[in-house]
Image: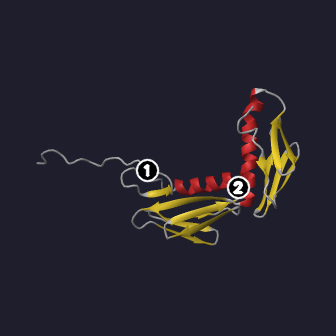
Amino acid sequence: MSRVGKQPIQIPSGVTITATDDNISVTGPKGTLEQFGLEGIKVSQEGEEVHVSRTSDVKEHRSRHGLMRTLIANMVQGVTEGFEKKLELNGVGFRVNVSGKTLTLTVGFSHDIEYKIPEDVDVSIEDNNIIVVTGINKQRVGQIAAEIRSFKKPEPYKGKGIKYIDEHIIRKAGKSGGEGAA
């Protein structure tokens, strides 16, 4: 049995879970999330716990067991606490601004980059160079953060660009001085 899949999911107060054969819905204080059911995986609620089990030991069912448990646990965490990713802007003259649902980045190109923020996530700015992406869906928060980072990935020589707060950029040595410049 899957080590992850056999662990029960604790349901905090204020969260309701509705599970049918083809859909799982989690509602909490921050909103509602839905996930389609996976073939061969059964979700049952017993009191304040949700149990995920599989119908057989077929390889596909075993591989989906832990996945389904993790997806449901992420949905429960999302509707109670939410998720957050922080990005840092490094570079001289690099600026970021949020106005309404538009993120404007000035990152060394001849033009500003304008990114339309989707409705299901929020983007805010801290300390003029830290972009905070928050939302209830872990996948969407990570995807939006990755899209913002992709506009100017950090380069390995000076580290200029957009990087995750906890990301470590491996630096390369620059040019070494030439021998005997004539």
Which residue is at 79% across, 60% downward?
28
Q: Which residue is mark 2?
A: 137
Q: Looking at the picture, does residue 135 appear above or below residue 21?
A: below
Mark closer to the chain start, 2 or 1: 2
**Numbered label attached to residue 110:** none
Q: Is residue 103 left or right of residue 28?
A: left
- Name the residue nearer the viewer: 65 or 36: 65
x, y percent for residue 84: 62, 59
Which residue is at 45% across, 53% downward?
154
Q: Is residue 180 left or right of residue 62?
A: left
Question: Which amino acid type is shown beneath numbered disc 2?
Answer: Asn
Q: Residues within 10 Å of mark 2 (few under 14, many from 20)?
A: many
Q: Is residue 92 visible?
A: yes
x, y percent for residue 142: 62, 53
Which residue is at 61% across, 61% downward?
133
| The quadrant where residue 116 appears | bottom right
What is the distance, in whole Å, between disc 2 and disc 1 at their CAs? 27 Å
- Name the residue nearer the viewer: 173 or 179: 173
Q: Is residue 64 left or right of residue 131?
A: right
x, y percent for residue 1: 75, 31
Q: Secondary structure at mark 2?
A: loop
| The quadrant where residue 26 appears | bottom right
Farthest residue, direction bottom: 99
Q: Secondary structure at mark 1?
A: loop
Q: Residues within 10 Å of mark 1 (few under 14, many from 20)?
A: some
Asked if disc 2 and disc 1 are in contact, CB closer than 8 Å, the reply is no
User: How has the structure been colored for display?
Assistant: secondary structure
Number of labels in the image equals: 2
Question: Which amino acid type is shown beneath numbered disc 1?
Answer: Ile
Q: Is residue 39 visible?
A: no
Which residue is at 47% across, 62% downward?
89
**Numbered label attached to residue 169:** 1
